[in-house]
Each structure stands twice: as structure tokens, then as C-alpha cells.
Amino acid sequence: MSLVLLTKRIEFAAAHRYLRAEWDEAKNRAVFGHCYNPPAHGHNYLLEVTVAGEIDPKTGMVVNLFDLKRVLLDMIEEFDHKNLNLDMPYFKDRIPTSENFAHVLWAKLAVQQDIGTLHTIRLCEDEDLYAQVTAADGLEIATVTKRYTFNAVQEGHQGRDWDCFVTIRGKIDPATGMVTDIGALDRLVQDAVIKPFNRQDLCQVLGSDTVSGEALTKTIWDRLVGKSTGGALHSVRLVSNRDLSFDYAG
């Protein structure tokens, strides 16, 4: 029987701060930006846990959702409304970035016997930024996805908002706890995508009679690939509306 994936979402709140004590303030601020600001900043985290397994012929389920929810609630109770830097021993020697935090949660869930086989963990700081770790990638790799929005005219349509999700994949830097420099990624996307496209006619900008969503997604990929600071461009998702999106992964 084929494996089936099942995903459960759960929310909790926690605070963190990015800093390395051995670095001076100038370097901490240059590397971590606003995330360095004292004392800490909080997030309403959304955790998505995906497990894999065969469907039990007796229950019709991959895993009992009651058991999965119980395990998740028990786990996040340890972190809920805590300062990750000060209260959690897991971050004594590493920065509580979303990438590192996702791997901590993975280690705690991977030993649970009642939730099937752990497949993916996605940890969302907010609607615009999330980290993801998978069984296939192992302990050193993560992806980070950042959402950007621009408004542009497509042939036959009035100006519309496009949500552009840019995903970077790579090893977690042991010094920074990050896959990529988010500030540098923001600047790259602003210069290569937002400034050229925002409030513009896409046909005029791209010199084409028509611009499909597929072509626009590929164009964004071409403008970003090979230019990230840390990690490598993994995928670009362009969302036209809630019913239509386009993905390109090179």
C-alpha cells in the first residue's frame, strides 16, 4: 500500500533574540539586523507537522489524530510563552533561529512512537517567513521561505497583487543559525523583482505581448538564481489568487 501524508497544525507563542556574545554590537547588528534588538521579540508560531504512513485497514487512518494532537500539545507546552534564549537549554550553545528551532522540535518528535513516521516540520514565524526541515534532508539542512508582494498589471487584467514565495535551501550556518542572510535576500528581491515590477505593466517591463503566470515565475527565478548570500535558490512560488499559483524549481 502506498504511503499517505497527514499534516496537523498547532499554534504557540515564544520569544527569541539573535546574538552571539563573543561578537561586538556592530557585528551582531550587521549580521542579525532587527532580530538583535534587546531584550527579545515574540512570535505567534504556527507549527505544521507532517507524518507518513500506510492507512490502517481497521481505522482508515494513517495515525490517530487524537494521539498526534496530544503529543504536539505536550511538546509545545515546554516552549509556549517562553524566552527561548533564557528559558530553554536547547539554545545555550546555538541561536534560536527558526531553522535551529525546527530541528529541536524534530528531535523531540522523532522519538515519539504514536505519531507514525515523521516526514516534514514547517515552523512559521508569521505569514511571511517560515523554515522547514524534512526526513530526506537530515540534520544539517533546512529551507527558509520568505513572502514578498507586488502589484502589477497583467494582460487583460487590472492591477493585481502577486504573492511571491522565495525558498532558499542549504546547510544551517553554525555561527548564525541561519541558512541564508535574510536581509541580503530582502535587498536582492527588492532590486530584482519588486522595484522593476511593482505598479508596472508586465508586458512593457518584459517586452512581450503576453506574460503568463508560468513565464513570470520563470523570469523571477532567472533574476534570483545564483545570487543568494548563503544557501541556494530552491523554488519560487507565485500566487495570483487563492485559486491559482505557479511553482518553478529550476
Image (tube, helix red, strand yellow):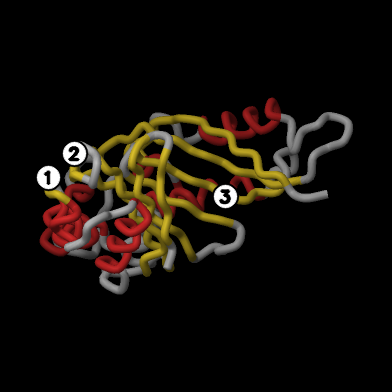
Q: Is residue 81 above or below residue 23?
A: above
Q: CA distance from mark 2 to mark 1?
A: 7 Å
| Residue that mark 2 sits on | 159
Q: Earlier in the sequence, mark 1 or mark 3?
A: 3
Q: CA distance from mark 1 to mark 3?
A: 37 Å
- Which kind of residue does numbered mark 3 sit on? Thr
Q: Tell me whether circle 2 and circle 1 mark residues in contact (CB < 8 Å).
A: yes
| Residue that mark 1 sits on | 199
Residue 119 coordinates in the image, percent (x, y): 62, 51
Q: Is residue 79 left or right of residue 219?
A: right
Image quarter of the C terminus: bottom left
Q: Is residue 37 left or right of residue 15?
A: left
Q: Earlier in the sequence, mark 2 or mark 3?
A: 3
Where residue 120 is drawn, which disc sits there? 3
The quarter of the displayed image where residue 184 is located:
bottom left
- Residue at image coords 79%, 39%: 55
Asked whether residue 97 is in view, the answer is no
